[in-house]
Image: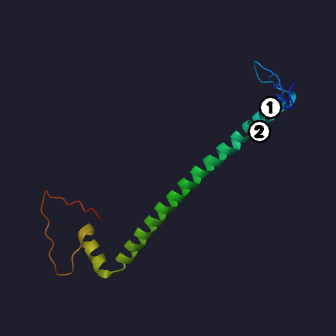
Amino acid sequence: MSATTTRSRPAPRPRLERDRPRLTGRAAALLVAVAILVVMAIVPIGRYLDQRSAIADIERRAAELESENADLRTEISRLHDPAALEELARACLGMVRPGEVAFITPGRTTAPSDC
């Protein structure tokens, strides 16, 4: 042998070949626990989503009612005006001022839309 010896690499360890992964008792218990937690979480998550949709419906309805209230407040303020009241009485009730003559044409009916 010469003065310089070549070092050889150690032989690699033989790999253990498995046909399928091993399922230990701990892994099985963990898998069962996780499955139970998932099943138990389904009902609260469903309730949460139902409540979120119910809240969204209520908020939408509240916005519609606020808009309707604003329209009604505008109508109330308009009806406090004497000129608007007179116009409404003439159009819907067929009222006239004293001394005025009302003409009615037979066979012709008017359907007032704002009454």
The quadrant in which residue 38 appears is top right
Q: Is residue 11 above or below residue 33?
A: above
Q: Quadrant of the C terminus?
A: bottom left
Which of the 4 quarters of the picture holds residue 81? bottom left
Viewer-proximal residue among 64 and 85: 64
- The residue positioned farthest toward the front in the image shown: 2
Residue at 57% x, 50% y is 53
Give the mark, 2 or 1, whose residue is nearer the N terminus.
1
Between residue 72 and residue 61, name the one nearer to us.
61
Q: Residues within 10 Å of mark 1 (few under 14, many from 20)?
A: few
Looking at the image, residue 74 sits to the left or right of residue 61; the answer is left
Specify the quadrant of the image occupied by residue 113: bottom left
Q: Is residue 4 above or below residue 49?
A: above
Q: Is residue 36 left or right of residue 71?
A: right
Residue that label 2 marks: 37
Residue type pointed to by label 1: Val
- SS at badge 1: helix
> x, y percentage for residue 39?
73, 36
Per the image, the residue denoted by label 1 is 32
Residue 8 x %, y %: 82, 28
Instruction: Please indicate whether residue 5 sits to the left or right of residue 46 in the image.
Output: right
Give left or right: position of 32 versus 109. right
Question: At label 2, which amino acid type do we have?
Answer: Leu
In percent of width and height, residue 48 lies at 65, 48
> Mark 2 and mark 1: span between their CA atoms?
9 Å
Could you say where residue 21 lies in the image, as x and y percent from the top left? 77, 24
